[in-house]
């Protein structure tokens, strides 16, 4: 009886200590991703892409190719340079298509019907995330809403910096050390 009471006290004290240290950290440091600054930036970026016909119903596209997890069954990747809030940077847009029995022809014919998500990497200003080559990541739904991870964090910003899974952890392994799998042009 007394042992289990002590255990409960111990667990209670630990969770209070953890939540205290979390709130101190949240007040002192900008969130690596999912915070207001990141979601605002992601919305600004979407508007720039929409104006340039890079996303939305009339977006230009390239030939879809067969993809792999965690991106879609079929993918279509384009890149260009855009300016967001006065900063010009390299932009890579990967559209992720999926659906029951979907084929390459289906995607080429009706891209909007099979579009599941739009994943984007945008090269931010120097110093944004020096140790990860200053990439800003976003996962949008087809209409430009920012998608969330299972814990409810918005997937925009330095996603998920310092964690062993997620955009940065996986893209870190891309050949050439530039965090980009398909080419090394951004180095
Ligand atoms: C488990 C590994 C993994 C994770 C996690 C991952 N990616 Fe990728 N990503 C890849 C691979 C592999 C490719 C190249 C695939 C291809 O285009 O055929 C790629 C390609 C891309 C590209 C095209 C540029 C390039 O690197 O060739 C973008 C943009 C992209 N991913 C965005 C994201 C975003 C945003 C996230 C997080 C929401 C994310 N990725 C999470 C593995 C991953």
Image: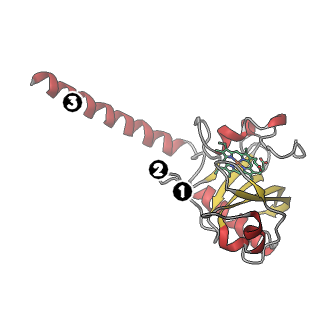
Vertical comparison of 74 with 165: above or below: below
**61 horizontally vs 138: left or right:** right
> In the rendered view of the protein, which quadrant contains the N terminus?
top left
* N-terminal-most mark, 2 or 3: 3
Of residues 22 and 112, which is closer to you in this image? Answer: 112
- Label 2 Cα neighbours within 10 Å, binned few <14 / some 14-19 / many ≥20: few
- Name the side, left or right, on which 150 lies relative to 113: left
Residue at image mark 3? 9
Discs 3/1, front: 1
Q: Which label was assigned to residue 151?
A: 2
Callout 2–callout 1 Cβ contact below 8 Å: yes
**Disc 3 from disc 1: Cα separation:** 34 Å
Q: Residue at x 67, y 52 (%)?
A: 71
Residue 120 x, y percent position in the rendering: 72, 56
> Between marks 2 and 1, how big is the CA–CA gap?
8 Å
Q: CA distance from mark 2 to mark 3?
A: 27 Å
Label 2: which secondary element: loop
Q: Which mark is residue 148?
A: 1
Q: Residue at x 38, y 35 (%)?
A: 18
């Amino acid at each position: 009886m007394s042992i289990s009471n002590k255990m409960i006290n111990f667990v209670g004290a630990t969770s209070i200590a953890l939540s205290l240290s979390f709130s101190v950290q949240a007040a002192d440091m900008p969130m690596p991703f999912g915070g207001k600054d990141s979601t605002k930036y992601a919305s600004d970026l979407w508007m720039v892409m929409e104006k340039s016909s890079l996303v939305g119903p009339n977006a230009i596209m390239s030939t879809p190719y067969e993809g792999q997890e965690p991106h879609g069954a079929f993918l279509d990747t384009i890149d260009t340079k855009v300016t967001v809030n006065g900063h010009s940077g390299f932009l890579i847009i990967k559209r992720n298509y999926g659906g029951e029995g979907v084929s390459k022809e289906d995607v080429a014919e009706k891209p909007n019907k099979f579009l599941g998500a739009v994943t984007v990497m945008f090269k931010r200003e120097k110093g944004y995330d020096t140790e990860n080559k200053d990439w800003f990541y976003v996962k949008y739904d087809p209409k430009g809403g920012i998608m969330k991870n299972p814990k409810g964090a918005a997937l925009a910003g330095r996603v998920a910096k310092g964690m062993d899974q997620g955009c940065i952890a996986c893209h870190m392994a891309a050949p050439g050390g530039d965090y980009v799998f398909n080419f090394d042009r951004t180095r």
